[in-house]
Amino acid sequence: MALRVMLFNGDGVVQEAISVMLPVPSFRVYKVSAIPKALRALRGTSRRAVVIIDFSLTNWQTSAQFMKEIAQDKYLIQQHAYILLLSTDETLSLQVGNAIALLSPTLLAKPLLKESVLAGVEAATKKFNRP
């Protein structure tokens, strides 16, 4: 069964890059940009997913709000694994520090390299093996 990978708030270029780096049939990559739709998709399934949250300079507020919503839901924290995709490897704003601490996401920085995306998804899925 393909591993579900949700790309939240990513632009078309990021989605295309992730889709190429995580090929079918091993992965099923889909993009969601609206917080309510993403939360419904994550709550509405018992299948685990890796959620890549694009935290770029142009859309960081939406991504920060999404992370805060997830951080308030114990089911979402435990059920899914999270990767935070950064514009650079610079420090994040403290506004989302608490949400990041609760989610324990794997961090990736752009530019995306196939090896780093694959390693990030593999690292994120190790969460599924914990009790």
Image (cartoon, grey):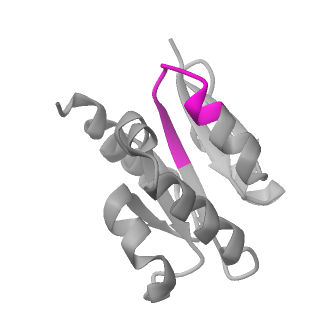
Q: Tell me where residue 86 appears, x and y as whole percent.
A: 54, 72
Q: Residue, x 40% and y 34% (percent of image)?
A: 79
User: As displayed, is residue 80 above or below residue 112?
Assistant: above
Question: 119 left or right of 8?
Answer: left
Visible residue check, residue 117: yes
Is 47 part of what is drawn in magenta? Answer: yes
Is 57 part of what is drawn in magenta? Answer: no
Q: Quadrant of residue 9?
A: bottom right
Q: Tell me where residue 124 appears, x and y as whole percent.
A: 36, 45
Residue lying at the far right in this picture: please name it.
12
User: As displayed, is residue 127 above or below residue 119?
Assistant: above
Over which residues does the magenta segment extend?
Answer: 41-51
Residue lying at the far top in this picture: please name it.
1
Q: Quadrant of residue 131?
A: top left
Along the line of sight, the residue nearer the viewer: 25 or 45 = 45
User: As displayed, is residue 40 above or below residue 110?
Assistant: above
Q: Tell me where residue 28 appears, x and y as whole percent.
A: 63, 27
Q: Residue, x 50% and y 11% (percent of image)?
A: 1
Along the line of sight, the residue nearer the viewer: 75 or 87 = 75
Q: Tell me where residue 71 appears, x and y as whole percent.
A: 44, 57
Question: 63 left or right of 89?
Answer: right
Report how many numbered discs are placed on residues in the image. Answer: 0
Visible residue check, residue 20: no
Q: Residue, x 38% and y 44% (percent of image)?
A: 74
Question: 121 left or right of 32?
Answer: left
Along the line of sight, the residue nearer the viewer: 108 or 6 = 6
Q: Residue, x 73% and y 47% (percent of image)?
A: 36
